[in-house]
Image: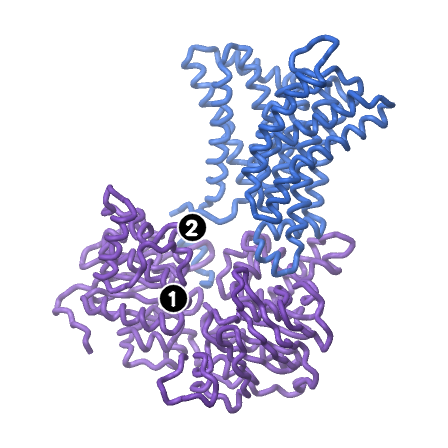
Amino acid sequence: MTRFQRFPTAPARLVLAWRAAALVAAALIVGGLLALSGRDVFVLGELVLRSTVGSRFGLEDLALFMTPLVLTGAAVTVTSRIGLWNIGGEGQFYLGAIGAAGVGLYMPGPQIVVLPLMALAAIACGMAWIVVPTLARAYAGVSEIITTLLLNFVAGLLTYWLATGPWRDRVTGALASSGRISDAIPELWGVVHWGFPLSLAIAAGLAAIMTWTSWGYEVRVSGANPGAARYAGMPMRGRVIAVMLLSGALAALAGMFEVAGTVHRLQGGMADNFGYLGIVVAVLARRSCLAVIPAALLMALILDAGIVLQTQQLAATAVLAITGLVLLLIAIGDELAHYRPVAPASSTRSGAAA
Amino acid sequence: MEMPSAAPGTPPVLQLVGICKYFPGVIANEDVNLDVRPGEILALLGENGAGKSTLMNVVTGIYQPDAGEMILDGYGAEFASPQEAIRAGVGMVHQHFKLVPAFTVAENIHLGWSETPRNASPAVLEARTRALSEQFGFPVNPSARVEDLSAGEQQRVEILRVLARRARLLILDEPTAVLTPAEARDLFSALRAFRAGGNAVIIISHKLDEVMEISDRVTILRGGRNVGTWETRECSPRMLAATMVGREIVPQDMRARSEGAAPRGVAPELSLRGVSVRDERGVETLSDVTLDVFGGEILGIAGVAGNGQRELTEVLTGLLSPERGEVLLGGQTAPPGADAFARSGVGHIPQDRLHSALAPPLGTTDNMALREYRAPPIGGSGLFRADAALALAREIVGLAEVRIPDFGAPVRNLSGGNQQRLVARREMRIASRVLVAAYPSRGLDIGAIATMHRYFAELRDKGVAIVLVSEDLEELLNLSDRIGVMFHGRLMATLDAEDADIERIGLLMGGRDVGEDVASGGGVA
């Protein structure tokens, strides 16, 4: 008789298979519910497909959504490698946007100089935003989850204040928005700018650093067991500080890409939950920097499909519910991937007991 | 014997018939028969991985058997969960306690219990706990937080928790592993009282002396199968050990050098000069310790756990820098930091391997690289070469004679014995000068302990200095050339093992200096 048993590890291909099944199940449930509420599921489905992967416009949109999600997802993933959670991606995103906009608005110069300066300013601001939680964590053991989270609200309000106050648009009078920034990241394909391939390269580079450097090894061990890191004489505190600052820089870079690549202004509310969705991306990616890319793609697809559905008079809350359903089913799929069939009687008896 | 003999025809409290439990690639239990009668203490004996814990997990409903029957008081029983088992009167106290550290004793006792009153105010719960504590004869402080209790006190809470739920069969997994000798004595007298009430106890243990002292009958498991059951009074420790491992264990004097062994060094490899350490509360945990360890010798450190041994090993391995005094490595002031010590050839087998020597969620490859990732072939120019790390892991695993099917699978899935072998081999590789081993045989079975001792003798014969911290005096006397005794952070004395006897070490462990009044009562041993 075949029995299923829970194993402590889940092989990647099983995780993938179960996740695919989870997505199909989610699509069926959502489709069933939409049909019950009297909508034409096939028309809606076709519309969603056409406006995401089925058209050039849709693909461009996906890439634009993915760019910040890859970076904020990577920001959370790197901290999770050392056993910490940076919940402040949203705030660091805003600070990155503020830093970039400040340079873009008030430092004229050739684009080749201004764009790198915007990136550097963004990174510096993002790091500055996480430095207090970092030091509190490293030296006083203060939970970084609380401190990074609370700073999000401060950053959001700071952005509103700048965009409605000192930096407000005095030309067109756009609401809660700074003036237009003339320096933009060059476009690569339609509206998709160079930030997209750059963010993918950053995720791949981080994956390489985590796997192939002794620094990455130390981060891995420190995250898995701080006691073992101390025992081996690893500089734990230094690694915690470095990883958290790196995380802040990544989220801030997402803000800079958004300002200089997509929005071209500093706007109140422009982070649009990208920081928080980065947490979801990181959870989906299961601590792998490389897996952040497909996880961000899935998240971008859900966001994009949600917008399409909203244009069809579906409530925004319904879209949120769909997102939750997808994540729930994926979590169930991840758990199921731990189970594998075992045949007790035949093959196992020959093996010696451990 | 004060044991009440059950009336003839009284069925066993628990009877197992042909229990089988399989895990992928492993027979955990096969065709195990066992019975426990009212009013007896049954010892369950076996090596690491013999299937004792799995069998007890089947009995308490954590696992379901793949085949076989469980009969409780003459009726067939099946437990889908530990809650069902405890409702039927079968309760287990695990080796690693399952208490909520931040809760009080009273809260832990009442957690998840159908009889917990609706008015669960601290006063009510504490009063009930006090009553239970008196009823069962397990003194506890109901309002204390569990995290502030010693291991022995936590264990009393665990046992009381099970007894309060009217358990008639109490299962204890290596209950004395974490206890001081005095606490162990208290536990045994409480168990005897429990037995006198017509209840039954199954006790899992590695310590043969204990089994001889406390149990009425012994059941031995080997390779997942039941080897047999004997009346304890018909057994000898020697016979039990041989049956357990399936061969005769010859206790050997490991102090004998092999041919061509390196002689004892003339200059000390590692020295402490007046070293003192304070903990964060300002209490002096190590006071003015001076010692020398020479190459080619084993220095044993005896003492009741918690008398400064942890601090001593941490100072000796560079994890802790002393507040006062000096640490000398090969006659020179030692460089600061655990990493520098390791690079100078100091290996360290710490007392809690899962907490500090290994990263449990990571694979064997990552764990075996812990000491050598900085230098080529694995490290160098900031890189981590996974292929070289895997090669190193294969080499260590080969020397340790451990079977690892998947080098990427978390090491927490390995048995305690295998983890310890891997750590020991990893540390022996880097220990070109000194190996500091703290309680290396804790939780290991006799076979694994013998392997560990062989490792140490091998290393000593190569000329390495070994510091062996242990609470097992027999182990210390078998291996050590000299024995230092710790008490309240002080090194009471260092004796030559030749003329040291257990009696004298026992007195020193109890804080009595030689020459003091010896006649007034036995020492702590």
Say which residue label 1 marks.
Answer: B174
Shown in blue, the chain is A
Category of crowding for the residue at label 2, using alpha-carbon neighbours closer than 10 angstroms: few (below 14), some (14–19), many (at least 20): some
Q: For the view shown, which residue lies furthest in the top direction? A: A172
Horizontal side, residue B45 vs residue A153: left or right: left
Colour displayed for chain B in the image of the structure: purple
B315 or B323: nearer the eye? Answer: B323
Residue B219 at x, y percent in the picture: 32, 70
- The colour scheme is by chain
Helix or strand or loop: what does disc 2 sit on?
loop
Question: Compared to B263, does B65 lie above or below?
Answer: above
Quarter-wise, where is residue A196 in the image? top right
Residue at point 31%, 55% (across, down): B142
Horizontal side, residue B284 vs residue B118: left or right: right
Helix or strand or loop: what does disc 1 sit on?
loop
Q: Please report, as a chain letter, where disc 1 is located.
A: B
Residue A48 seen from this side? yes
Say which residue label 2 marks.
Answer: A343
Quarter-wise, where is residue B121 in the image? top left
Q: Please report, as a chain letter, where disc 2 is located.
A: A
Residue A134 at x, y percent in the picture: 63, 42
What's under tag 2, amino acid-wise? Ala
Mark pair 2, 1: CA separation: 32 Å
Q: For the view shown, which residue lies furthest in the right direction? A: A110
Residue at point 52%, 48% (across, down): A9
